Image (spheres, rainbow, N blue to C red):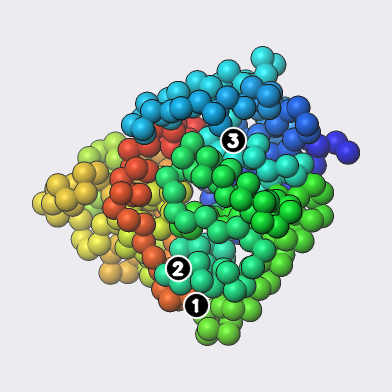
């Protein structure tokens, strides 16, 4: 079996907007010695075999036993250094921060994504209880800051799952984040995703939640240039240099998952932006918004066309998650602590720089 050819195919198959947006999600293949993982800051749908970062698995081992600093920045910096030391000299690129988590699963292939359909469950108030009922074989992970902390927590939970069940989980659901699927053949990965999607679609339907989310219509050029003109008077020039817009939809008004924060920021601006109202927003939140919700439209703002478009795309994705979550008690926003960790996360801003 050609491990790399298979993981490239899986990356493309699960790299569509049904599964991930922007640079979200990651994939890996492994044998006993080497882990090939998606580089940080790349897009699943465009991955080529030569892009994967080869990691010497024996050199990752110290990561699991070395005491790490409690302070998040220092901890992530040390872990980044240790991961870089494990990268094969022939590889370039920085491995995904979730590489140790991929390493902790024995299966040949791991496909991690953030589907709106699944996040309707993981980001819902009753998500955990519903997951236990609907997916009893899955491992549920309570919300944990991404990066090393998450990897170590999941590693421990995989070990205790294995002790209890005699095997590792094939599916891991991460609260307010997404899903990991692990299997040693591509067909099994697809089958597991299909099963999850089928079961969730049935649940949404039974709860009267429509799964046919019509993609909001992009705004016409006239409307967009009007908005741009207005925004240029209210926001700093670089921040609103590019604007993407869609007809009004019910966007989320709080932080849903790390990726939603990375691309769309935690809170949208609601209303008509003026110098004064934007200044008040910045005073309250500490940043200029990436998403603006007016009476009749939703806009993504950015310093490039791509980042403006991604801000809007993640707002649309968030709207889908919010709707689906109604089947499980409604949306559960992230806590202030969890949100602040992402807002200050260097690794994520690196990824956004690469992608957006
Ligand atoms: Zn993720």
Residue closest to the far left: 276
Does residue 321 appear in the picture of this structure? no
Q: Are the two marked residues, 3 and 2, in contact with CB atoms closer than 8 angstroms?
A: no
* Residue at 81% over, 37% down: 3
Local crowd size for mark 3, using a 10 Å CA cut-off: few (<14), some (14–19), many (≥20): many
The alpha-carbon separation of the residues under discs 3 and 1 comes to 33 Å
Q: In the image, is 85 to the left or to the right of 48?
A: left
- Front position in the image: 266 or 334: 334
Crowd rating for badge 1 (residues with CA inside 10 Å; few <14, some 14–19, many 20+)? many
Identity of the residue furthest to the top in this view: 89
Among the two numbered marks 3 and 2 on one chain, the one whose residue lies closer to the N terminus = 3
> What kind of element bears circle 1?
helix
Residue 212 falls in image quadrant: bottom right
Q: Residue at x 14, y 47 (%)?
A: 283
Nearer the camera: disc 3 or disc 1: 3
Q: Does residue 281 appear to the left or right of 67 in the view shown?
A: left
Check disc 3 and report its element: helix, strand or loop.
helix
Residue 59 appears in view:
yes
Q: Position of residue 209 (x, y in %)?
A: 52, 80
Q: Measured from the top left, where is residue 12 in percent x and y?
A: 70, 46
Q: Residue under label 3, please give it.
A: 100
N-term mark: 3 or 1: 3
Indicate whether 113 appears above or below 271: above
Whichever of labels 2 and 1 marks the residue nearer the N terminus, that label is 2
Ligand 1 within 8 Å, label 3 CB: no
Disc 1: which residue: 327
* Picture quadrant of residue 44: top right
Gap in angstroms between the C-alphas marked 2 and 1: 8 Å
Q: Which mark is residue 124?
A: 2
> Helix, strand or loop at disc 2?
loop
């Amino acid at each position: 079996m050609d491990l790399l050819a298979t993981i490239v195919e899986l990356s493309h198959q699960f790299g569509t907007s049904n599964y991930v947006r922007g640079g979200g999600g990651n994939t890996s293949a492994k044998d006993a010695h080497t882990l090939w993982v998606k580089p940080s800051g790349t897009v699943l749908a465009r991955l080529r075999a030569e892009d994967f970062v080869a990691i010497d698995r024996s050199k990752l081992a110290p990561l699991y036993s070395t005491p790490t600093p409690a302070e998040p920045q220092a901890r992530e910096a040390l872990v980044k250094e240790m991961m870089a030391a494990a990268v094969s000299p022939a590889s370039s690129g920085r491995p995904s921060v979730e590489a140790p988590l991929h390493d902790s699963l024995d299966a040949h292939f791991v496909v991690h994504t953030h589907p709106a359909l699944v996040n309707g469950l993981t980001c819902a108030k009753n998500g955990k209880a519903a997951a236990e009922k609907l997916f009893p074989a899955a491992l549920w992970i309570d919300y944990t800051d991404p990066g090393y902390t998450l990897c170590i927590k999941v590693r421990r939970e995989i070990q205790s799952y294995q002790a209890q069940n005699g095997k590792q989980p094939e599916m891991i659901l991460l609260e307010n984040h997404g899903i990991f699927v692990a299997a040693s053949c591509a067909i099994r990965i697809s089958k597991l995703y299909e099963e999850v999607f089928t079961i969730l679609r049935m649940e949404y339907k039974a709860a009267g939640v429509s799964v046919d989310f019509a993609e909001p219509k992009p705004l016409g050029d006239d409307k967009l240039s009007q908005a741009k003109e207005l925004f240029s008077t209210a926001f700093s020039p670089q921040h609103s240099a590019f604007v993407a817009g869609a007809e009004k939809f019910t966007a989320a008004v709080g932080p849903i998952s790390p990726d939603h924060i990375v691309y769309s920021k935690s809170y949208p601006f609601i209303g008509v932006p003026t110098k004064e109202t934007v200044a008040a927003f910045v005073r309250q939140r500490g940043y200029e918004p990436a998403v603006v919700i007016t009476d009749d439209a939703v806009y993504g703002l950015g310093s490039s066309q791509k980042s403006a478009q991604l801000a809007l795309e993640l707002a649309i994705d968030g709207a889908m998650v919010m709707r689906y979550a109604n089947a499980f008690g409604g949306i559960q926003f992230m806590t202030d602590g969890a949100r602040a960790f992402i807002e200050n996360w260097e690794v994520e801003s690196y990824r956004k720089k690469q992608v957006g």
